[in-house]
Amino acid sequence: MKRETFAGKLVRISVPIALQSLMLALVAAADAWMLGSLDQNSMAAVSLATQVQFIQNMVLTAATSAGAILGAQYWGKGDSRALKDIFSMMLRFCGGVSLIFFLACELFPHWLMSALTSVPELKEIGIGYLRVAGWSYLLTGISQCYLTVMKVSDHAAPSAYISCGAVALNIICNALLIYGWLGLPALGVRGAATATLIARIVELTLAVAFSLCKGFIHPEWSGLMRRNRLLAQDFRKCALPLLGGALFWGVGFVSYTAIMGHLEADAAAANSIASVVRDLICCLCNGIGAAAGIMVGNELGAGRLELGREYGERLMRLSYITGVFSALVVLCSAPLVMGYIRLTDRARALLWGMLIIQAVYMIGRSVNTVVINGIFAAGGDTLFDMYSLAVCMWGLAIPLSLLGAFVFHWPVLAVYACTCLDEVGKIPWVMLHYRKYKWVKDLTREQPAA
């Protein structure tokens, strides 16, 4: 195939997904900016409280990523019936997970916030946020299943439109409900949570409506209860390592946030802003990584293994270029960020240092997102992610961070640097595994007649 075909396909898939990722990150940015204009504690407390949803999203991502891996290959093969069965599996799993997190936020918010911070003021603000936002967590898993199936079935653009529309609505409602514009009550932190709930309701409604249009894949009620034994086996084989990796990564990231939150209020505030900057700039590598999974998966599922391998080579090289570009964006954005956020002098100094450290981190994050979450996952090579996280994050970065924070009492920036070690440190291991080409594999099966 010509290079233009590869480039055109990459742009067509990655741009809507990157835009979708950007818009989702903008919600956190809007929360931080609007709540930060009220007071530093509100911003920091919400940043901590949203770690609960972060963990939920990690579990949901395991199911939707497994569905995307198999779905991309079966769609490349032209088997839409198998994709519908995969859709049903995702809905059953994600619906159950969403219910569990909803109940946790409504029944045990005090316990959740106590795990994230020891500062009483932050804890009380976060509890109020979770009691409202928990209702939105009930809907998130279902909408993510619909949006995932759209992406793998050549409808990445509508999926992005839905997410972007929901995010725009979220930001508008944020302003109305946090500040009390247009005669509405000024709810502050509870207003941010209510805005999130409104956006999730609209997102799910639009996703279901789009799925019923001609040419889209939608679940069948009979399929929700039907069990496809072979597909279920393949789904578990992909999902379980992804779940292990997602939990390792998700709980690890929450641990980083909790460590910073237990140091001092200024460290928690600076880290919350640094996290928003990270999530905004990672949108590019997220889009390319998702596109890598779909593009490589389509070719492998269609039996074109050599072309899938060629796509992997191009995308791997692109990941390094993306990482360097992202690092430069972090450094260039630092003055702009500092000019728009109200922080104490101590928090501002910490934020400057965190952004410099984060620039180096971006190179590793980009390479690992594209190669591990995109290329490796496309061929069902999902165990490596869990192994690498167990060694680099849980065996190196988290122990060093804990020791530095609570035993050796290192400076805040030294502890923060420890939390960024895992992504950069595992690049040589990732490249060594990449060259084994275990990811070049067709996962599809011939499905029995309906």
Image (cartoon, rainbow, N blue to C red):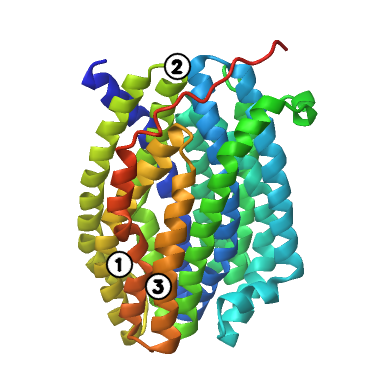
Please name the amino acid that badge 1 sits on: Val
For residue 302, the mark is: 2
Vertical relation: 219 (above or below) 392: above
Kind of residue sitting beneath label 2: Ala
Decide which of 341, 100 is in the foreground and name it. Answer: 100
Q: Taking the image as drawn, is residue 381 in sight? A: yes
| Label 3 sits on residue | 271
SS of the residue under disc 1: helix
- Which quadrant, please, contains the N terminus? top left
The residue identified by callout 1 is: 337
Disc 1 or disc 3, which is closer to the eye?
A: 3
Earlier-in-chain disc, 1 versus 3: 3
Where is residue 286 drawn, in percent x and y? 39, 45
Q: Which of marks 1 and 2 is nearer the N terminus?
A: 2
- Contact between marks 1 and 3 (CB within 8 A): the answer is no
Q: Where is residue 43 in the image (x, y as percent from the top left)?
A: 48, 73
- The CA span between labels 3 and 2 is 44 Å
Disc 3 crowd, CA 10 A, few/some/many (<14, 14-19, 20+): many
Q: Position of residue 132 (x, y in %)?
A: 68, 64
Residue 424's x, y, as percent? 30, 59
Up-down relation of residue 376 to residue 107 (above or below): above
Q: Quadrant of residue 341?
A: bottom left
Q: Is residue 222 above or below residue 62?
A: above
- For disc 1, the neighbor class at 10 Å (few under 14, some 14 to 19, many from 20) is some
Q: Nearer the viewer, residue 276 or 95?
A: 95
What crowding class fits label 2: few (fewer than 14 Cα within 10 Å), some (14-19), or many (20 or more)? Answer: many
Residue shown at 23% from the left, 16% from the top: 2
Q: Is residue 411 left or right of residue 135?
A: left
User: Which disc is residue 15 wearing?
Assistant: none
Residue nearer the viewer, 186 or 205: 205
Q: How many discs appear?
A: 3
